[in-house]
Image (tube, grey):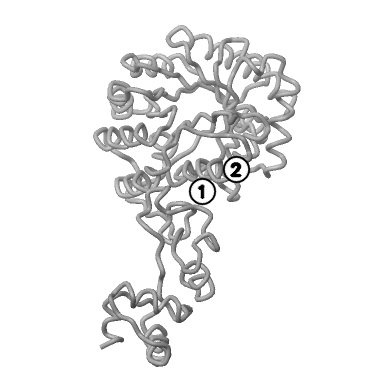
Amino acid sequence: MSQRIQIFDTTLRDGEQVPGCQLNTEEKLQVAEQLELLGVDIIEAGFPISSPGDFRSVEEIAKLVKNATVCGLTRAKKEDIDAAAAALKHAKRPRIHTGIGSSDVHIQYKFNSTREKIIEQGVWAVKYAKSFVEDVEFFAEDAGRADLAFLAQLTEAVIAAGATVVNLPDTTGYLLPNQMHERISYLFENVSNIHQATISMHNHNDLGLATANTIAGIQAGARQVEVTINGIGERAGNTSLEEVAMILNVHKGLGFETGINPKFLYPTSLMVSNLMGMPVQANKAVVGANAFAHSSGIHQDGFLKHAQNYEIMNPEDVGVPSSAIVLTSRSGRAALRHRLQLLGFAFEKPELDKLYTRFLLMADERKQLNDEDLKELVG
């Protein structure tokens, strides 16, 4: 039987930190409604103390969302936690997400503190947040570079204080997948009360390894993943929701499942991209414009014979209307014949060969041919 992985979506908090991608309250409500339709388990709605607008957005999302947990981020400070508790007062399933830095770099240069004081402040924050809500998540920022023995000590202390989830972020996207697996495994072996809380992955993509590190963390025992639509987020972005969801869907042998309805992945991607004005790169996995497009003649011929020659997912399964045969000078006769047949034209081999010669000349000139170009080619 598959184990359930909780999907914690932070598009509206970490994702919205991308320069130029800020949303107003009404836009955030649209996204939150779509995320619930998609099937996410937790929606991190914002950082209530950061601005009056963010406070209002969290408050309104808390009123709107019916099934998912609604979460507000805080630092390990009284005023932050007070603001989050106030913004979440109407939520059916509220969660306060509080925490502090855990690496020596952060402890020394960001907080001018000591390991002992960091544990003390983290424990206090969890207990104070717990006085408002039952569900408290603690983040150990920059856990990817933290001393492992100290990270184990901090994790054990905040769980003892009442944390229901412990988030171990690779905030700088530093780790390799094998290192992530080793770190999470170490914590499961050295934190005595670790099974009293859910361990969560929150990975950044500075080296392009956010998704790989998240899967490694799941395999080592993490049961929550913190992700964003289209992988948006600080610097090079966060772990992509659609990538994790479909990896677990395609690789059923891993033994994990999510509550995500994949048919809503592509529509949700489009919504977030349009509202934030941030285009999705064409070669983006799962939801990019080229994710189900074939332009090489060898690939086109194989795909037309049997789609699974070159596709491990059905486009319809993720909400993409269909695969695409893109006609370029690299396309072969099979692709040209296919596209002509869709337009109602049928040619015997000698005629097709002549057309193909003219097609290549036109494709070299125009780079990519559409249906109107083909009609002109046929005459």
One can see residue 275 in this view: yes
Q: Quadrant of the C terminus?
A: bottom left
The residue that mark 2 highlights is 173
Mark 1 and mark 2 residues within 8 Å of each other at the beta carbon: yes
Q: Secondary structure beneath disc 2?
A: loop
Q: Position of residue 303 (x, y in %)?
A: 49, 66
Residue at 43% x, 56% y: name it: 288
Tell me the CA gap for discs 1 and 2: 9 Å
Q: Position of residue 249 (x, y in %)?
A: 53, 42
Q: Which of 273 and 248 is in front in this view?
A: 248
Q: In this view, does 36 lie to the left or right of 302?
A: left
Mark 2: amino acid: Gly
Task: Please determine whether, in this image, residue 329 is positioned above or below residue 290.
Answer: below
Residue at 36% x, 74% y: name it: 339
Q: Which of 194 and 5 is in front in this view?
A: 5
Mark 1: amino acid: Ala
User: Local crowd at mark 2 within 10 Å, few (<14), some, or many (≥20)?
Assistant: many
The residue that mark 1 highlights is 236
Q: Nearer the viewer, residue 356 or 119?
A: 356
